[in-house]
Image (cartoon, rainbow, N blue to C red):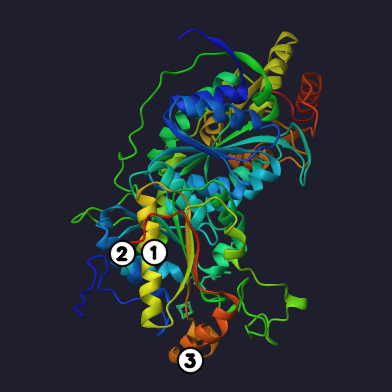
Amino acid sequence: MKYSIPKTITNIESGWCPGCGHGIVTRLLAETTEELGISDKVIIVRDVACGSMQSGVVTYNNIGAAHGRTIAVAAGAKRIRKEDIVIANPGDGSAYSIGIESTMHAALRNENILALVVNNSVFGMTGGQMSPTTLPGQKTTSSPYGRDTSYNGNLLDIMKVLNTFDIAYLARGSVDSPSAVMKAKKYIKKALMMQQDNKGFCLVEILSPCPTNWGLSPEDSLKFIKEKQQEYFPLGEYVDKGGYDK
Amino acid sequence: MAKTLMKGNEALAESALRAGCRFFSGYPITPQTEILEYMSWRMREVGGEFVQTESEVAGINMLFGASAAGARALTSSSGPGFSLKQEGISYLCGTELPAVIVDVMRIGSALGNVFQGQGDYWQLTRGGGHGDYRTIVLAPASVQENADMAYEAFDLAEKYTHPVLIASDAAIGQMVEAVELKDFHDHDINKYDWVIKGRKEGEDKRIAENVYYAMGADEYKDFLLEKYKRIEDNEQKWESVNTEDAEVVLVSYGISSRVCKEAVKIARKKGIKLGLIRLKTLWPFPKKAFDALTSDIAGFLCVEMSILGQMVDDVKLATDNKFPVKCYSEFSNVPDPAIIIERAEKMLLENGGRK
Ligand SMILES: Cc1ncc(C[n+]2csc(CCOP(=O)(O)OP(=O)(O)O)c2C)c(N)n1
Ligand code: SF4
């Protein structure tokens, strides 16, 4: 297989930890926009969390939004730049905790953007606290005995919520294996094509490792995604308005 | 253009559209709601974007995105809703983005009430959100000024790439007066070299984020101090009424200043030399208006609608404690000209008139 680095990836060293999933998701974004010939239309809206480090490694013009506000900011930018491709790039804490109201309402308004959510089941940037997607029993710095749902509350599977909404596309991918990465790439590409055709709101969530805060090696992190995270967050396409499978 | 009768809030909204505003995102709250309602149909007519957002937080953040993308963008709120916008205003300042935000002031902390008030003075002029920042704050006192200041606010915001707040209040927002509106102005969303759009090959990369990251702490500090000084030097606006020979000078803005003008007229008829400095910008505070006065004044009487007296702090700073400064503050009642004159006379008695 011939592989070349997408032109939109810079040679600036990223700040992500070894084995972090943010970098893989960024690479998929760069590959898909290049394949679709839309690299010069992309506007990224990133959070202040670990996703913010994307800014340096891509050549796209981008906006740094407040924590939890990438989707609202992206929707505002897209309404002004309808010819551009606007991608919000929040983490699970951003999209499902502090920013959940805008995730829901941007979907209700069918805003023509892609929310590309990196779900690592923790608040990465602030040192690994519990997020709405922390698994039952999972130890974090703010659930030190493991998440007890009767004490800490239940987790949020956004697919179960948004699959009843009238949106363009909803899917969950993962980066735990080469084949999973290829599938995740397909989901992202589909969502971008839908935005090009003004189909409306797309949310693609990617299960992604955070070895640093999971206290696991990069390899064991991938195993954790496959064996644990996917038990609660099954992969697949949940809403697909159709017409983009080739 | 001929004058038409309009409500203050609607004149503000129409005037913003005429200034080229093509994006509004906000959430209902009295007494600001007519701005949102007016925008809900009129923005469509002029081909712009109107969004009734899920909250004020979403409203200010959608505006943030629209502004970064180059649009002239507006949001408005009151009381608790204006508080919810503060994080976003801090981000606009840090990111150096222009935008116009209207606070149609109501009274009280917590829910307070929907009546006219001026209790947001500190919040408006001291930053209101986190971190070191100021915003330009315009203070209209009539429907005409609601329109004029909304129009001018966008130019100011872009001149300094900085948010501009309009400190209106329930009375100014709800009253109906004759107003002359300016012509439609086209705003080009590609006008500035900082706007975020898709990057063509060969173009410089643009990032809209806290400018401090690229500058580093030391340069940022100098940059900000210079910027705020420039605004303070150039943008102080006020109206002086009968201050030349005044023995007591009232200081006021917005709805309270209308009553003060009335009080000056009545006092003059009675032979009391009363004057008025009406603030048209709350920040930068019109210090120059005070510098221009002679030194034999019996004192300044601040007239404002806040229980604690807020603007009075700035008058003390502007006069450098060289004059007696008193405050007549009301909460839910509009100040009374008779009380203003009574207080002024008392100051004259205590401190003596011009020597
Ligand atoms: C209003 C506000 N609250 C809290 C924070 C602190 N904060 C920054 S990032 C973050 C959580 C990040 O988690 P997530 O969104 O899942 O992204 P990740 O770092 O895991 O990619 C928090 C709580 C903030 N910057 N702003
Ligand atoms: S803390 Fe986690 S999410 Fe953040 S860069 Fe490190 S591995 Fe990635």
Alpha carbon separation for disc pair 1 and 3: 25 Å
Query: Which circle's residue, 1 or 2, is located before the other in the chain?
Result: 2
Q: Position of residue B158 (x, y in %)?
A: 39, 39
Query: Which circle's residue, 3 or 2, is located before the other in the chain?
Result: 2
Q: Nearer the viewer, residue B5 or B125?
A: B5
Q: Residue at x 54, y 36 (%)?
A: B287
Q: Position of residue B4 (x, y in %)?
A: 55, 10
Asked which quadrant contains residue B202, the reply is: bottom left
Labels 1 and 2 positioned on one and the same chain: yes
Q: Residue at x 70, y 45 (%)?
A: B80
Residue B239 visible to an observer of this rendering:
no
Q: Nearer the viewer, residue B52 or B286?
A: B52
Asked which quadrant contains residue A31, the reply is: bottom left
Alpha carbon separation for disc pair 1 and 2: 7 Å
The chain holding disc 2 is A
- Indicate whether A38 appears above or below A212: above
Q: Position of residue B211 (x, y in %)?
A: 40, 58
The chain holding disc 1 is A
Disc 1 marks which residue? A188
Instruction: Report the amino acid beneath label 3.
Output: Asp
